[in-house]
Image (spheres, grey):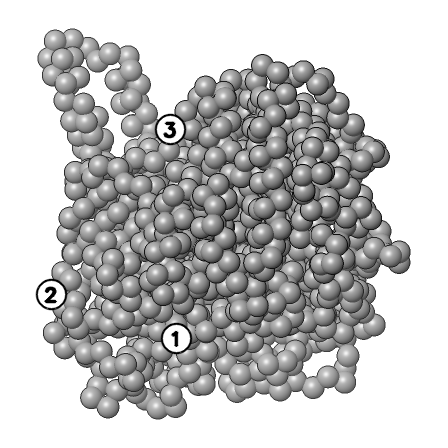
Amino acid sequence: MKLKKQVTVCGGAIFCVAVFSLYLMLDRSFLASPVTFIHFFPWGPFPPNRIEQLEQLLEENHQIISHIKDSVLELTDTGAVSPSGQLPFRSANGSWVLPFDGRPTFLSVKPQDCQFAQGHRGQTDLQMLDIYSLLKFDNVDGGVWKQGFEITYEPGEWDSEPLQVFVVPHSHNDPGWVKTFDKYYTDQTQHILNNMLVKLTEDPRRKFIWSEISYFAKWWESSDTHKQEAMRKLILGGQLEMVTGGWVMTDEANSHYFAMIDQLIEGHQWLEKNLGVTPRSGWAVDPFGHSATMPYLLKRANLTSMLIQRVHYSIKKHFSSSRSLEFMWRQAWDTSSNTDIFCHMMPFYSYDVPHTCGPDPKICCQFDFKRLPGGRVNCPWKVPPRAIVDANVAERAHLLLDQYRKKSKLFRSKVVLVPLGDDFRYDKALEWDQQFLNYQKLFDYMNSHPEMHVQAQFGTLTDYFSAVYKASGVPQGFRPPGYPVLSGDFFAYADREDHYWSGYYTSRPFYKTLDRVLESHLRGAEILFSLAVAHARHAGMEGRYPTSDYTLLTDARRTVALFQHHDAIAGTAKENVVIDYGNRLLHSLQGLKRVIINAAHFLVMKNKDVYRFYQTEPFLETVRNQTEIWMGFGLILPRSLLVRYLVLFNPVEQDRLCVVTVLVNSARVRLLTEDGQTLPVQLSAQWSTATQMSAEASFMVRLPALGLAVFHLYDSADSPMTLRSDTLLRLSDRGLTVHNVEPLPLRSQAADPLPFYVSTQSLTLGFSGTTGLLESIRRKDSPQEVKVQMQFVTYGTRSSKDKSGAYLFLPDGKAKPYSQKGPPVVRVVEGPLFSEVVAFYQHFQQTVRIHNVPGADGLSLDVTIMVDIREQSNKELAMRLVTDIQSDDTFYTDLNGFQMQPRRHFLKLPLQANFYPMPSQAYIQDSQYRLTLHSAQALGVTSLESGQLEVILDRRLMQDDNRGLGQGLKDNKKTANRFRFLLERRSIETEAEPGNHGPISFPSLLSHMTSAILNHEVLALPVLPKKRGIPPLHTFAPLKAAVPCDFHLLNLRSIQHQQDTNSPSSYTALILHRKALDCGLETINPGFNCTTTEGQLTVSSLFRNLDLQLLQPVSLSLMYSSPPLGNDSSVSLEPMEISAFRLRLR
């Protein structure tokens, strides 16, 4: 009777929603365009386009109703309204059925929001995937330019238009590599900057460029006002240029776009506040390969030009031969030219002096005057430089001009760029004199001899680009006539022979993981701090809130920014430097936890009048999240009947239905919501070894978007809603003894070779009875079992002189299957909220968990591989997924978590050349299925056979690879690599053609959500017991309206106060990213109301209980402002667009 009544109520709800949706539909259809309504409706029939819109809206309404019906059917068919009322129960097939919270949810993606992924792109002149197909990669000896070819010219080529030469002095300062950041600063960098101040002032013709703001800020803050003013004068006078202006010169393979943007903002905000300068040109001479994300971010930050250097030598040769080294770099998904930025690719081997003046390093080295005889460095080509004097200036100038002319033949303009510098150059006053005085003599000679047809001078990077634009007759940043347009990226990088820099995609994965944990905490802390300060202002309590926490945010921003340096997150620094980075990351993580605790304390207080902040008495504490627990760094219930309050923070901008797990020291746990409803709890074992355990509690919760939810935990007598996991140990060694915690049931049995299965309401997984590893995935809506076989393999390194190291991957052939002496211990856990299978091997532990919850959290496999290869020598451990998906030679990897890049496995390239960076995901697909491997840390990935994905998990290498580090990789740590496997089926009506591999591809909406779930874990914040008792708390739901589910709130960043650098101003930066969707995969109910809006968002209706007093579009790094919009305006983003806005909230 009760079931019938509930179905009737749900049916009535459907009818009401249908009527209301139809009303809204008509209201929107007519009132959205009042002029059309007045013109057509009274005097005639609807025009065809209006009828089509109505039909489309009716179809959308039908879809909404269908989704609600499906939700109701799920409530009835799966027994969510269970025979025992609201208690979990096991269905006939053995899977658990849970009481659902009963809220119908729907998914409504507008067809217009799907069109971007389906649309055709204009063909660019240079598409990197096509160029890879075209090139032979044959490494023919090119003579003096080993990796190139002989360059010739006619003497009279410059008679009508003289050659313009810009020699650009620079010093590349790594913020940590062989020395720590502080040690480099003390030993070298401070002297470079001090000498710069003196030596540039001596002659106004001298120029210099500087890139790393982390070092410049440290120098500035330790300098007196006299030095600061002198430096400011050099910058404003154009002698010193800040290039890129980021905190560091970021790695482009492993860095996530959140951190790439954040380090750019940190550098640009520092420059704006202290110097009032705005960088115009990008300078990236040392990242080991270049991502297409970087030009987009620089363009959005209003830079007009950029330079790159480390590109595969075969690509450099190809571009040189076609004079395509300068191009407009366009995003592959751009339907116009809005993302174009002018890019200069340096043509030769390195950015050092021997490889920058022209094609012959033997000659160019003679013009690196730091190498004059008697110094500590010399020329390897055995011909030293000679000081320039009257007797030799003519011969030296003609020799150098010959190189300049040959270099210019590789470009389309008669303007040539000649960088003059190297790592940590110009740290001695002597070198400034050697370089500047000798070059000035050469320039004076050249410029005073018109028959040489050259104008040579020192210049900055922007001086060079400005001259190119002027010579081409176009404004700054515009495409010069005839210059090519390029799309794609520049991975993998090889500097010579088959030496591919694809090892650093995985090197030191422990720190790559820690970086992402810190990034997630930073984003969460930024959002909560900004909201707490705004709400404190709104309540007139700004003076009582600890705004001094802003210093902790600044510290963490700068730590994250520093770690994006291309020798930090890359894992390519000395061991003591890595320890220094690690200490900084952990210190900042502790600071961010404090920011989060203090903000959450204020926001969950029901009565703000009783709010008190005590620095020494925190209101909340933090529980290590799942990643931190795996990393070996949970909520512990007191053994008493007292209530313990638990606050959960959801850092995702959508409501979230998910499973949360906390450690407990009692097996008698009861969980209540804020309004007193008891929730199901699954008690499980927390295993300290393969056979020893304590307890953990898991529960399903619905959390508000970006919100804080309050729960009550009791240590109470048995509750029917507290259920114990069923644990089975599959043992091959009968001598093993098992130690369990009462009253958690534990069984053991002898392992057998037959496959076994675990199931939820959404998924059934098959596992090998022998290995305990995943074999297959079957979705509940499909009768077909899809092969997804997990294997582990190892690579060795070569026996020759050149071996794998921190940078290089030089394997000794194909991977070999991982083997160990005995079979693994396999643990199978089944319960109402999750089931998991854990296989214990000597060097790794595999955990595959599935959550029995509706929506996105229950549709993918939560996989953790705990790796410990500290006993190994010259070995790399990889996980390989083998499927029946007919992916041929094509696979897809992400660039910086921002966009997907199609890849092809080329047999003409060595194995190591087919590995690519995977900061957040990779997938393979055919006309039926897509399998996505989502990753919580950056690793190297490939697909060496059709239907395979392979990811390197860790590398232990005993030697240096001769790229300057001087060490191998021997400081491995026990590391948890966390993934989500998502198997999606293609919709029949949008079936993909197997051979159609275009230059663009996008994740599905479900895939975007899965990535967010993995990378932004729920944070558990227990309330500390108080002598005075706990004041009333309530859930904090900050959003008044749902964020469209193709929008990602990248950051809500408090902007620094202009005078007090330790405090926030009244302004906040809102950074939004609209994601592009592949709608050709079956859409499944995500577990929350999900709609798209064709890129429209009304910011004023976004935040609950806050007034929006300013809405101003700004550039990505906040330096350039557009006129403010009306406070009630909608902002509009195109698919893939990242936009920033300055807000004033109170």
**Amino acid type indicated by mark 1:** Thr
Question: What residue occupies the far front of the structure in this picture?
Answer: 391
Please, is residue 130 above or below residue 506 in the view?
above
Q: Quadrant of the C terminus?
A: bottom left
Q: Residue shown at 66%/84% (left/top)?
A: 738
On the image, numbered disc 3 is attached to which residue? 112
Q: Which mark is residue 540?
A: 2
Please, is residue 1053 above or below residue 324 in the view?
below
Q: Residue shown at 57%/53% (left/top)?
A: 432
- Residue 1095 can be seen in this image: yes
Q: Is residue 162 left or right of residue 277?
A: right
Q: Is residue 332 left or right of residue 1093?
A: right
Q: Residue shown at 44%/64% (left/top)?
A: 218
Which is nearer the eye, 459 or 784?
A: 459
On the image, numbered disc 1 is attached to which residue? 622
The image shows residue 930 at horizontal and vertical percentages of: 59, 41
**Amino acid type indicated by mark 3:** Gln
Question: Which of pointers 1 and 2 lies earlier in the amino acid sequence?
Answer: 2
Mark 3 lies on a secondary structure that is helix
Q: Residue 915 carries which label?
A: none
Q: In which quarter of the image is the N terminus?
A: bottom left
Please, is residue 488 above or below residue 613 in the view?
above
Which is nearer the eye, 782 or 1085?
A: 1085
Q: How far apart are marks 1 and 2 (CA)?
A: 28 Å
Which is nearer the eye, 671 or 1005?
A: 1005
Question: What residue occupies the far top of the structure in this picture?
Answer: 44
The image shows residue 308 at horizontal and vertical percentages of: 58, 40
